[in-house]
Image (cartoon, grey):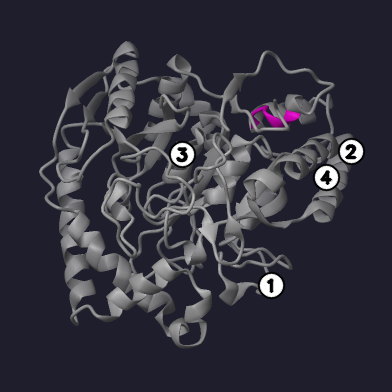
Amino acid sequence: MRGRTHLKGWNPMTTDYLNFMPAAGVATLIRQRQISPVDAVEAALQRLTAVEPQINAFVTVTAEHARAEARRAEAAVMHGAALGPLHGVPITIKDFIETADVRTTYGSRVHANNIPKRDSIVVQRVRSAGAIMIGKTTGPDHGWKPLGDSPLTGVTRNPWALEYTPGGSSSGGAAGVAAGVAPIAVGSDGAGSIRIPASFCGIFGIKPSYGRVPHPGQSPAANSCIGPMSRTVLDAAILLKALAGSYAGDPATLESDPADYPALLGSGVAGRRFAWSVDLGFARRVDPEVRDICQRATQAFVTAGASVEAATPAWGDLKSIIDDIWPASWVGRIGHLLPDWEEQMDPGLVACIKAGLEQPRGTFVRAQTRRIAFAEIAHRFFENFDFLLTPTVAVPALKVGLLVPEDWEPHAWDWMQWAPFSFPFNFSWQPAATVPAGFTAGGLPVGLQIVGRRFDDLGVLQAAAAFESLRPWAHLKPVLPAIDD
């Protein structure tokens, strides 16, 4: 139940013309009045209706609101109004980001009927850029794991292979982009929640430097970032520029304005120094096929004029740090919900919270101290390299219903054992992106992670763009049975 096909040229008389066109292309056609925002939104809603029964990527579809916004966007074009960089482009928003008068559930039955009164600053910036929200996308219970199921919304599936997870916690956003519903999505990433689903779904995703994009309501671990997922690097660059910038309501945001990411993408990586690590010195095991696909993909940077050197950072067992931080963090955030809601919560999340409740006093603080020490060591590592390359995830997408791969030792809540490459850079607050590196023999996408120095979001985007120019992927799309066959 999987497959892929090449787009052989877009026909303006078909929905594929818009559904699999990059956001930059859609915005350009709208500006040129070759298509209307109404056309773009209708194509997205038609595709959503077609694929949603199979992938289950949406908590809420805001069809009528989107249509009304599209009509207003069309009028703005016709009257010669100033247009934002994403004017009329359909977009999805993770259902963990507050939207005025549209429910925000955090993937949880606890918040199933939560309807915020105002948009978050991120959604305000999405609207200012001209993008049109067509719906809120799924994620696991409170975003606690990198998988696509929750007690509230059921199972979200990977468009490349429906029996597999799209990853998470930005599950529906990645699945929707991969399936051609919308070209761009807003996700969030506290330990890999943008990069893991982007990798599993064969798209691009970037976790910016901590503080680059406002994210009020931060977790006690101070590790989560909001960022874009897209079919192309350019689309992510446009969206990230729109989202980034200081905000008084979030004291962690960076004061400086973002660089002009889209305009500066093409600088290349000639002369830049890349480190390649297959395990970061502590990963328990890496699937051999994933390892080989990613290692071959690193040669694209050599072709682009950069150097790539195998390296094993001497960072110690980072897994032991997150093992202490993750349960304690969830105790601090939602531990108070257990007495009333335990039976309606994800059992793995409940087990994780209970593990946190059993931790000795001071565990969280001691783990944070070790985390800060690691961040300093990591930054010193980047004095010798511009970028670090790793697999994005140690394994291909898991089958639906699994918390760990079938041949791994089971655990009640510990998913980090198969995703060791993402959380370290939430700890160190560095920008990290995933680019599609290839497919397994079984047809599952594999991602290559690009990590940059803190604040060098532009450099990571430039490296990703250089890779994309040599190994493009946006012309590929999954084949959904009964829809694309």
The residues bearing labels 4 and 2 have C-alpha atoms spaced at a distance of 14 Å
In the rendered image, the vertical position of residue 191 relative to residue 199, given as above or below: below
Query: How many C-alpha atoms fall within 10 Å of the one at disc 4: few (<14), some, or many (≥20)?
Result: many
Image quarter of the C terminus: top right
Residue 93 colored in magenta in the image: no
Numbered disc in front, either 3 or 1: 3
- Is residue 353 visible from the viewing direction of this image? yes
Q: Distance between the residues labelled 3 and 1?
A: 31 Å
Could you tell me what secondary structure mostly forms the magenta stretch? loop
For marks 2 and 3, the one nearer the N-term is 2
| Bounds of the magenta segment | 18-22
Picture disc at residue 79: 2
Q: Mark 1 points at which residue?
A: 115
The answer to whether the residues at label 2 and label 3 have Cβ atoms under 8 Å apart is no
| Mark 3 or 4, closer to the camera | 3
Q: Position of residue 30 (x, y in %)?
A: 78, 30
The answer to whether the residue labelled 3 contacts the one labelled 4, judged by CB atoms less than 8 Å apart, is no
